[in-house]
Image (cartoon, rainbow, N blue to C red):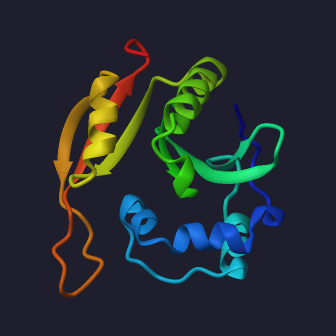
Amino acid sequence: RFVLPMLTVEDASPRCAECLNDPLSARMLNVPPRPVTVDQLKELIRAIDQYEKLALGIFVLGSNRHIGVFRLRFIDGRKRMVPGVLIGEAEWRNMGVLTEVTNAAGTYFFETFGLEGIVAAVPAYNAYIIKYLEDREWQLVRRMPGKKHSPTAEPAALLVYELPRATW
């Protein structure tokens, strides 16, 4: 149902900026809420090397509707990767997009790049993603202190999960 091309500056749009300005999106990204402009989005896209760090758009097949972003960075000499998925369009959340996109991308990256594993750091408050990972046999490997984003709010702990190739 979806295609995942590499993001280009042409993909930066007011609608995409609105999705990132959504308080729920900021919370899921574990970043402080702040306004993001189209020009800032373009700069963010330009800063991604598309080699060690990739940013893929999630588009609805046949409609060119941009509903989310799949970003990743390779670590450990490209033996493992750290993914991040944001379904920015609210009406597409909880509709199976995450499962469909991560299943296809995981298979592609394990087979094409010969990855040994995938690592994810999840804010401890993100019960939805924690359940998603644990249901798919990701292993909790450590708990880390979170980053302080505000002088008044306590930082959320990060739970680090890993999915080894053998489990995939």
Task: Report whether 46 appears left or right of 137.
Answer: right
Q: Residue at x 76, y 43 (%)?
A: 5
Residue 65, percent from left and from top: 75, 51
Judged from this view, the residue extending furthest toward the bottom is 151
Q: How many marks?
A: 0
Task: Tell me which residue sits at (27%, 29%) in the image.
Answer: 134
In the rendered view of the protein, which quadrant contains the N terminus? top right
Residue at the spot 58% in from the left edge and 49% down from the top edge: 71
Residue 151 seen from this side = yes
136 sits to left or right of 127: right
Q: Is residue 78 visible?
A: no
Question: Closer to the camera, 62 or 121?
Answer: 62
Q: Residue furthest top?
A: 166
Residue found 61% across the figure and 52% down from its top: 68
- Depicted 75 relative to depicted 15: above or below: above
The part of the image, by quadrant, that contains residue 157 is bottom left
Q: Is residue 108 above or below residue 48?
A: above
User: In the drawing, does residue 6 fall left or right of residue 128?
Assistant: right
Picture quarter with the C terminus: top left
Q: Nearer the viewer, residue 137 or 77?
A: 137
Residue 33: x and y in percent read 41, 78
Q: Is residue 137 above or below residue 76?
A: above
Q: Quadrant of residue 106?
A: top right
Left or right of 117: which side holds 141?
left
* Residue 41: percent from left, percent from top: 67, 72
The x, y position of residue 39, in whole percent, is 72, 81
